[in-house]
Amino acid sequence: MNIILFGPPGAGKGTQGELAAERLDLVRLSTGDLLREARTEGTDLGQKAQRYMDAGELVPDSVILGIVREVMEAQSHRAGFIFDGFPRTETQAAGLADMMDEVGTSLDAVVVLDVADETLVRRLAGRLSCAKCGVVYNRHFEPPREEGKCDVCGSALVQRADDREETVRRRLEVYREQTAPVLDWYEGAGVAIHHIAGDRPIDAVQADLTALLSA
Ligand code: AMP
């Protein structure tokens, strides 16, 4: 099964994708996570991507399609993928369709997580994560017990560079201008598109998502 988890930054694609991938034994492929790893490792790819990411702009399609191809080839023995944060442009969507054709597989559905803009800004601009163990908090919704410190391991909490409010607003604009039209592309291609209200507790969204994917 191959699914695209679609939606604006901050809609909960990462959280929901991780839970669903584990439950359904699928590979979660997050281009954002792959780019951040490359950046941390200081690879050429990471350096190339950094300035786009910090500005809230999209990394060029050719770079993104290259990393997706690599993961898809390496994980081709697995039962399928949950794509998170990819595709973000029509060129990426067309590239994914070609890659799937090459290996004789196809996309089953696009699942859109819908969340209002103001909630997205509060979620993203309030997001903090532990530099050491990766646990994610939110200043407004899920604050740590002690300010700036991880409940689990006590390490310092950090904010992603692109989660600053100004950059968050740019990321939402980029989503509306360049990424939202990808849904029309899928509609034209005859792919099933489902919407889930993402503005609810994690468990409620996950229950709807797994019910949908298990049907
Ligand atoms: P994310 O964690 O998915 O919100 O991605 C963080 C940043 O990585 C985005 O704001 C983009 O700069 C870059 N990025 C991630 N995925 C893509 C993609 N599919 N196409 C272009 N840029 C991407």
Image (spheres, rainbow, N blue to C red):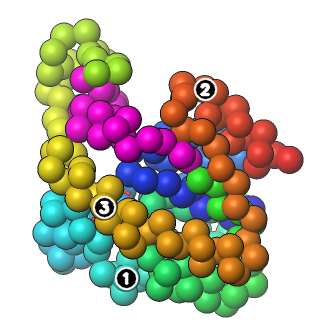
Mark 2–mark 1 CB contact (< 8 Å): no
Specify which label sits upstream in the sequence, 3 or 2. 3
Query: Residue 143, position in %: x, y?
Result: 28, 17
Q: Which amino acid does label 3 sit on?
A: Glu
16 over 98 or under it: above or below: above
Q: Is mark 1 within 8 Å of ligand 1?
A: yes
User: Mark 3, mark 2: which one is toward the viewer?
Assistant: 3
Q: Mark 1 points at which residue?
A: 61
Dot 3 lies on which element?
helix
* Depth order, front residue of 23/2: 2
Q: Name the residue under label 3.
A: 173
Determine the residue positioned at 64% across, 55% down: 111
What segment carries the magenta color? 113-139
Determine the residue positioned at 78% across, 39% down: 211
- Give the class, few, some or many, for how many residues have Cα within 10 Å of label 1's Cα (few <14, many ≥20): some
Specify which label sits upstream in the sequence, 2 or 1. 1
Determine the residue positioned at 77% across, 45% down: 212
Distance from the alpha carbon under mark 2 to that under mark 1:
33 Å
